[in-house]
Image (tube, rainbow, N blue to C red):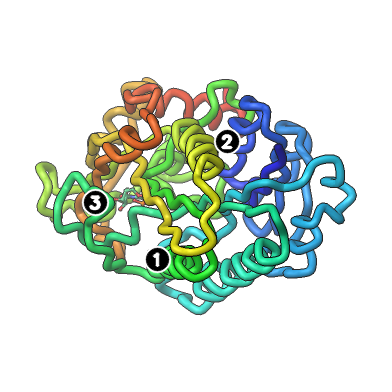
């Protein structure tokens, strides 16, 4: 069964591609390579790769019809949509870039899928990669899916709008979807041949590694005056392979839905470990796992950072039977560090 993975050359996408392969799906990666890594797809994952844009409706429609050489053996039966820009800070500086890329292009992609579904006996469902950033300042922690969504940055809004499209298109066109709201993706495949490789890097754990490796002089801790025990922000770190597994379960859930012509509501799931760690605690844990001292200083708050984000993932457990395999942050950090060392040629 072929699955089109948009943004499959990125961090969570590439791990999901590997999980799909392990479960005998045939993933096909579509990525425009603005942030993705082609070699990861062609040399490490060894799956078909198409360089292109999700907003290219000709390309998408041909792919779905099976007109593309790469896919003629097996038709695409599901889509996992990761492709997006994901830098919160940049989204505040340049919201148009985020709305054009994440919202407008996703709208084009969804339109292509809806058109295809309208003219075909087959009904292609979609799994959408969203974020806990759509909650903004949560009313209640741990955060369950019914928490009011009120994003505090354009990145969060851009994901929120696509969630809204999925709701409306489910209602009006019967488009079936699962929406995953991830908490903080971290770690790497234990094989350490794929992992997190952002340029620029803005995420806490790889930035701490940058300080250890000397790439970065000092880590700035963004604010220590938050209403938390040690004053630094608390986040829920979830292993990227656990996120990947959830996508397989999400796809299977959609394949098991009866064909309804209209009135499908997206099924929404939070994905996290249900445990929070402050920035200072993460620094301590990284120090413990790597045996290195980390040089850091307190800096001012970063715009758009809520103080505490911790997931309740009960719904994913109840409906999908999903449960994180990597519950210990030490193991998540260990996998991330192994990958970081290999990717940066550190012995
Ligand atoms: N953080 C920090 N210094 C950095 C990068 C991140 O103090 O150089 C903090 C950030 O404010 C947040 C947490 O680490 O509270 C996790 O940030 P990250 O960017 O990794 O993920 P986000 O929570 O923004 O998705």
Disc 2 secondary structure class: helix
CA–CA distance in space, label 2 to label 1 = 24 Å
Q: Is mark 1 within 8 Å of ligand 1?
A: no
The circle drawn on residue 160 is: 1
Q: Is residue 214 visible in this depiction of the protein?
A: no
Nearest the eye: 122 or 201: 122
Q: Looking at the picture, does residue 133 appear above or below residue 102? A: above
Q: Looking at the picture, does residue 163 appear above or below residue 290? A: below
The circle drawn on residue 298 is: 3
Callout 3: 10 Å neighbours few (<14), some, many (20+)? few
Rendered location of residue 205, percent (x, y): 40, 39
Question: Which quarter shows the N terminus?
Answer: top right
CA–CA distance in space, label 3 to label 2 = 33 Å
Read off the residue under disc 2.
15
Q: Is residue 24 visible in this depiction of the protein?
A: yes
Which numbered disc flags the more N-terminal residue, 2 or 1? 2
Which numbered disc flags the more N-terminal residue, 3 or 1? 1
Q: Within the image, what quadrant is residue 15 found in?
A: top right
């Amino acid at each position: 069964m072929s699955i089109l993975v948009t943004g499959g050359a990125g961090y969570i996408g590439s791990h999901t591609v590997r999980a799909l392969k392990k479960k005998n799906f045939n993933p096909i990666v579509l990525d425009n390579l603005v942030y993705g890594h082609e070699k990861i797809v062609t040399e490490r994952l060894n799956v078909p790769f198409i360089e292109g844009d999700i907003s290219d409706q000709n390309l998408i429609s041909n792919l779905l019809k099976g007109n593309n050489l790469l896919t003629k053996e097996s038709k695409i039966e599901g889509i996992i949509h990761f492709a997006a820009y994901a830098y919160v800070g940049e989204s505040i500086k340049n919201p148009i870039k985020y709305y054009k890329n994440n919202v407008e292009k996703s709208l084009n992609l969804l339109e292509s899928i809806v058109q295809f579904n309208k003219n075909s006996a087959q009904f292609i469902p979609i799994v959408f990669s969203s974020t806990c950033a759509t909650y903004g300042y949560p009313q209640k922690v741990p955060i369950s899916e019914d928490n009011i969504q009120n994003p505090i940055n354009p990145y969060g809004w851009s994901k929120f709008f696509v969630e809204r499209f999925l709701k409306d298109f489910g209602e009006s066109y019967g488009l079936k979807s699962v929406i995953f709201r991830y908490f903080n993706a971290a770690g790497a495949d234990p094989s350490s041949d794929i992992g997190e490789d952002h340029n620029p890097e803005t995420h806490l754990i790889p930035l701490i590694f940058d300080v250890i490796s000397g790439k970065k002089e000092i880590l700035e801790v963004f604010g220590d005056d938050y209403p938390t025990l040690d004053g630094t922000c608390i986040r829920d770190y979830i292993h990227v392979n656990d996120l990947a597994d959830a996508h397989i379960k999400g796809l299977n859930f959609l394949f098991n839905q009866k064909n309804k012509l209209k009135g499908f509501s997206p099924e929404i799931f939070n994905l996290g470990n249900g445990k929070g760690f402050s920035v200072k605690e993460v620094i301590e844990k990284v120090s413990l796992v790597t045996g290195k001292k980390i040089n850091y200083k307190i800096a001012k708050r970063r715009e758009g950072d809520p103080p505490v984000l911790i997931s309740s993932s009960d719904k994913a457990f109840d409906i999908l039977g999903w449960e994180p395999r990597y519950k210990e942050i030490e193991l998540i950090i260990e996998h991330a560090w192994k990958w970081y060392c290999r990717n940066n040629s550190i012995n």
